[in-house]
């Protein structure tokens, strides 16, 4: 059962999540395939050039995907919505696959070819889906979701075709599973603006997202411009997800489950849901990434596998407990 | 003083087949207006036009001193609030949080609810006697309790006009009377317009009735002027006799055998 937090408890929840995040970041910096004592670590290249950018990138991806998921579930009023529902993953995958298959080597604005093509194709995908689902200047959420699903099916057919004719199955498959192994300061700096601006947009639109909890028509009678809100939040959520996909491939689970998870615990008030989901998404990604690179070290397990293996049973437990208490 | 003035209103979902045909009336401050009429007569359509969910094909709607087309969504939401026939509770929201949603038209982009908003919500909760329930999850309430929450949410908008679509249709008779009494009390400083199926209930509590049929007004005025055997025959094709309740002096129809 959702328990209503009072103002003090809200502050404590946010403060303790931030503290956990800080501890997780420090532990993650200490752990790795090479053991380095904390004293030596401060002066080592491994900390500054490898571990720190990777931990920061993990946290940023966690924020991007969880907030993107919160926004999409809110505006589409659909619990199955996630950052990938409008074809971002499918578009990004086709972009990355083309780039890998062609062995393209170019750099735009300091971004290398695979992330750049993945980013561009993700946004093309969302744009096509959005345009296809527009009827008479209006977009119904159901049409949007169905168009996203249909477009994804189409794009995954293209993806399979590319994989088969190119023979780069392994490279493409690894990209699809998602990984942070390509983390660099360049990647971190590329996604930071998306994370900051996106989180700000989400937070300052939380009153619209709250009004939408009552349904689209009620939100209109509360003075919300539903069409504009939807367009702005769709744009922000898509840019956030596309940025995440371009640097880390298809990391599943965070964007779908974190919003649900947090809603089950603290309720759907977006004013609190957004900061708590952002912190939780960051925490989950940092912890999962640490596990993924240390548990079978030096081998790395794709982070999406770790997250689903640990997170899915825990989520099911929460869901069942909630249903049982509801009875 | 008139709060709402509707002139020659034509609207509907298809311009070739308007639901409301040339409707005109006005509502004064302090009035509790009941919109009655058979299914499909345009009662809900009328409310949707006043709240701006439905655009007009012709005619004018004036709210206070403003024509509806000159008010933006937020300005309209500060003047007119709407309680739909069935509002869904919000899973995970308490009564107080849901009532606070009624303050949405007063929030600024970069700020959240302030003292005024909490005061307005507290006042609305008090008016609807929800004080004991304010921390309860909205999903735990009975139909009658939740209907009060829905009205409190609309009242927190501090509207000049409160619109309710069949506020009593899914409540038992105790809550029907309960809600109507509350509404009658709330009409001072604003006006209330509600659609009803139950003519006797509407006649008992409303200060004015408007009887619609096929999108046209076939009678309007004080309840005993509207609830007459002739009007009911015209609207519903049902034969009734009408008596005055000796205590309330309100017109009340009784079906003829």
Image: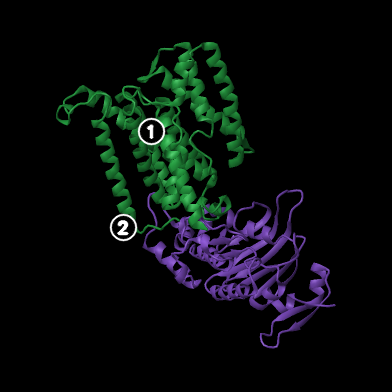
Chain colours: A green, B purple
A200 sits to left or right of B257: left
In three-dimensional space, the C-alpha distance between marks 1 and 2, rounded to whole angstroms, equals 29 Å
**Residue located 79% across and 68% down the image:** B235
Disc 1 and disc 2 in contact, CB within 8 angstroms: no
In-front residue for pair A146/B165: A146
In-front residue for pair A174/A60: A174
Is any atom of residue A228 visible in this view? no
Q: Secondary structure at mark 1?
A: helix
Which of the 4 image quarters holds residue A39? top left
Which of the 4 image quarters holds residue B238? bottom right
Q: Are marks 1 and 2 on the same chain?
A: yes
**Residue located 60% across and 54% down the image:** B52
- The residue that label 2 is drawn on is A8
B190 sits to left or right of A313: right
Disc 2 crowd, CA 10 A, few/some/many (<14, 14-19, 20+): few
Marked residue chain, label 2: A
Is any atom of residue A219 visible in this view? yes
Q: What number of labels is visible?
A: 2
Q: Quadrant of the N terminus of chain A?
A: bottom left
Q: Position of residue B48 (x, y in %)?
A: 63, 57
Q: Residue furthest left?
A: A39
- The residue that label 1 is drawn on is A61
Which of the 4 image quarters holds residue B184? bottom right
Q: Position of residue B64 (x, y in %)?
A: 55, 64
Q: Secondary structure at mark 2?
A: helix
B41 relative to A315, above or below: below
């Amino acid at each position: 059962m959702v328990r209503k937090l009072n103002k003090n408890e809200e502050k404590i929840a946010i403060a303790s999540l931030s503290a956990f995040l800080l501890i997780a970041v420090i532990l993650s910096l200490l752990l790795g395939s090479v053991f380095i004592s904390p004293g030596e670590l401060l002066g080592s290249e491994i900390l500054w050039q490898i571990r720190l950018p990777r931990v920061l990138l993990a946290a940023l991806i966690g924020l991007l995907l969880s907030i993107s998921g919160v926004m999409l579930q809110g505006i589409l009023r659909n619990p199955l919505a996630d950052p990938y529902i409008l074809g971002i993953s499918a578009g990004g995958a086709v972009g990355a696959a083309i780039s890998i298959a062609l062995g393209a080597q170019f750099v735009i604005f300091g971004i290398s070819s695979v992330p750049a093509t993945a980013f561009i194709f993700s946004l093309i995908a969302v744009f096509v889906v959005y345009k296809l689902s527009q009827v008479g200047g209006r977009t119904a959420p159901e049409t949007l979701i169905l168009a996203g699903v249909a477009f994804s099916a189409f794009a995954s057919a293209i993806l399979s075709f590319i994989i088969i004719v190119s023979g780069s199955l392994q490279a493409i498959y690894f990209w699809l599973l998602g990984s942070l192994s390509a983390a660099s300061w360049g990647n971190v700096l590329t996604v930071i603006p998306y994370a900051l601006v996106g989180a700000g947009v989400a937070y300052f639109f939380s009153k619209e997202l709250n009004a939408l909890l009552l349904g689209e028509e009620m939100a209109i009678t509360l003075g919300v411009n539903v069409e504009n809100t939807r367009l702005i939040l769709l744009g922000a959520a898509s840019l956030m997800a596309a940025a995440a996909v371009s640097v880390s491939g298809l990391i599943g689970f965070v964007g779908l489950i974190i919003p649900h998870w947090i809603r089950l615990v603290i309720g759907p008030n977006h004013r609190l849901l957004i900061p708590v989901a952002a912190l939780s998404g960051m925490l989950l990604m940092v912890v999962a990434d640490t596990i993924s690179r240390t548990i079978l070290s030096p081998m790395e397990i794709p982070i999406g596998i770790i997250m689903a293996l640990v997170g899915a049973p825990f989520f099911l437990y929460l869901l069942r407990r909630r249903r049982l208490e509801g009875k | 003083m008139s709060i709402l003035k509707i002139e020659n209103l034509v609207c509907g979902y298809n311009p070739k087949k308007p639901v409301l045909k040339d409707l005109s009336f006005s509502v004064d401050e302090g009035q509790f207006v009941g919109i009655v009429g058979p299914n499909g007569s345009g009662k809900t359509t009328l409310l949707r036009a006043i709240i701006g969910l439905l655009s007009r094909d012709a005619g004018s709607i004036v709210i206070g001193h403003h024509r509806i087309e000159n008010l933006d969504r937020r300005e309209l939401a500060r003047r007119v609030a709407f309680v739909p026939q069935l509002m869904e509770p919000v899973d995970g929201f308490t009564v107080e949080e849901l009532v606070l949603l009624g303050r949405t038209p007063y929030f600024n982009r970069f700020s959240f609810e302030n003292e005024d908003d909490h005061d307005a919500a507290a006042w609305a909760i008090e008016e609807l006697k929800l004080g004991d329930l304010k921390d309860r999850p909205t999903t735990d309430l009975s139909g009658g309790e939740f209907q009060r929450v829905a009205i409190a949410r609309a009242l927190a908008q501090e509207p000049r006009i409160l619109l309710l679509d069949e506020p009593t249709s899914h409540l038992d008779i105790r809550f029907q009377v309960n809600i109507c009494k509350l509404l009658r009390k709330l009409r001072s400083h604003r006006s209330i317009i509600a659609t009803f199926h139950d003519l006797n209930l509407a006649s008992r509590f409303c200060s004015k009735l408007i009887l619609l049929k096929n999108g046209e007004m076939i009678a309007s005025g004080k309840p005993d002027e509207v609830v007459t055997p002739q009007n009911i025959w015209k609207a519903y094709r049902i034969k009734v006799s009408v008596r005055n309740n000796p205590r309330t002096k309100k017109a009340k129809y009784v079906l003829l055998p």
